[in-house]
Amino acid sequence: MRKIIVFLMCVFAVTSVMAAEPTCNGGSTITANNGTTFCKSDKGMNWWSAFTWCESQGRTLAEFSKMCPGVSQTPANEEGDCPNLQGLAESGWVWSSLAYGSNAALLVNLSSGAVSYDRNYGRNHNGYYALCE
């Protein structure tokens, strides 16, 4: 009986760990230049939807400091501002979890590495991708 209980406890523990494993369904796994892996959504969405989408993957919307380690949190919109995400096989602007001002959030371009924010639509813009850690 004791062996059965130990076996069931092991099965439960393995199942719990497997259930907590983050996914990337409806997205692409990308690897930053420093080796950090992220999940990028395949569809554009607003900032709040990006948060929710990352949570549905068992992840969180990426922190700017993890996307662009050692980079100033000031948008300059110049190529190479975020070398960690510059020149990746993926392209497009991705949301960071970092709010900027009252209605915006910092964005990073996966092709050029530029850091910016949407001056017109802010966090309501549906054209940027979620980037989850």
Image (cartoon, helix red, strand yellow):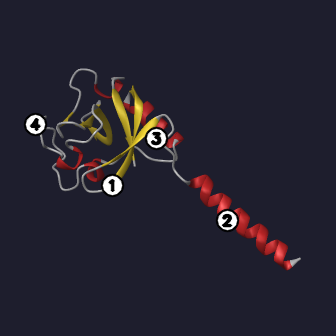
- Please state which amino acid type lies under the numbered disc 4: Glu
Label 3, residues with CA under 10 Å away: few <14, some 14-19, many ≥20: many
Residue 13 - label: 2
Circle 2 sits in a helix, a strand or a loop, which is it? helix
Q: Residue at x 17, y 51 (%)?
A: 71
Which of disc 4 and disc 3 is earlier in sequence?
3
Residue 48 - label: none
- The quarter holding residue 101 reads top left
Circle 4 sits in a helix, a strand or a loop, which is it? loop
Mark 3 sits on what residue?
A: 54
Mark 1 sits on what residue?
A: 36
Measure the C-alpha gap from mark 4 to mark 2: 48 Å
Measure the C-alpha gap from mark 1 to mark 2: 27 Å
Residue 129, how many percent across, how many down? Answer: 36, 32
Which of disc 3 and disc 2 is earlier in sequence?
2
Which of disc 2 and disc 1 is earlier in sequence?
2
